[in-house]
Image (cartoon, rainbow, N blue to C red):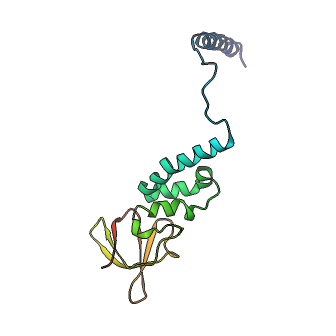
Amino acid sequence: MTDSDEQLSQYFGQRSNRLFHKIANTIQIPPTIPFDMQTFQNLVDSRRQWIDSTLIPWCKEASRKDLLLAEHEWQDLAGRPAPEMTLWKWAWERFPILSHTGLNAINETNCVVVQCVDGRIATGYPDAVRSQAGLLFLTIESGETMGPITIDEIEQIEVDA
């Protein structure tokens, strides 16, 4: 380090130190911040409320791209539950015919009509095994598989009459 570098370092170091103390003396930090998490049960209830009020609604509206990003961070976001049992289940709940209480996969019971945003229409039975990561596959009457149709492409799903 040259003499001029050392002088600059000392100058800026002293100026930074003075600036820090000046700022620190003008900021008033509250002595305590109210915190409602007094018990473990409070923490559990708060997390459950966040999941119900924020995470599940987000899953029902998010794009497939964002859902795939969330899947990689799912353990940090939602804890131990597997993404296919929560993230993707909640994402598919935007189409009520595909969900069923107590069922953690796509409901395969009914033949459905899938209307896509680009005007395409597909009819068949949802295939819960193949339908993963926001991709819907249908089994048509001939036994062949149709798809994938991305969750973002789907405008509406109804029971086939």
- With respect to residue 59, does 17 lie above or below? above
> Toward the viewer: 25 or 107?
107
Quarter of the image with the N terminus is: top right
Quarter of the image with the C terminus is: bottom left
Residue at (49% x, 66% y) in the render: 101
Q: Residue furthest bottom?
A: 142
Residue 27: image x %, image y %? 57, 14
Residue 26: image x %, image y %? 57, 10
- With respect to residue 81, does 136 lie above or below? below
Residue at (60% x, 18% y) in the render: 29
> Toward the viewer: 96 or 67?
96
Residue 30: image x %, image y %? 60, 19
Quadrant in the picture for residue 141: bottom left
- With respect to residue 39, does 116 lie above or below? below
Residue 61: image x %, image y %? 41, 55
Quadrant in the picture for residue 23: top right
Q: Looking at the image, how many numbered discs can be counted on the residues?
A: 0
Is residue 160 shown left or right of residue 33? left
Is residue 145 shown left or right of residue 75? left
Residue at (49% x, 57% y) in the render: 67
Quadrant in the picture for residue 32: top right
Q: Residue furthest left?
A: 119
Residue at (53% x, 67% y) in the render: 102
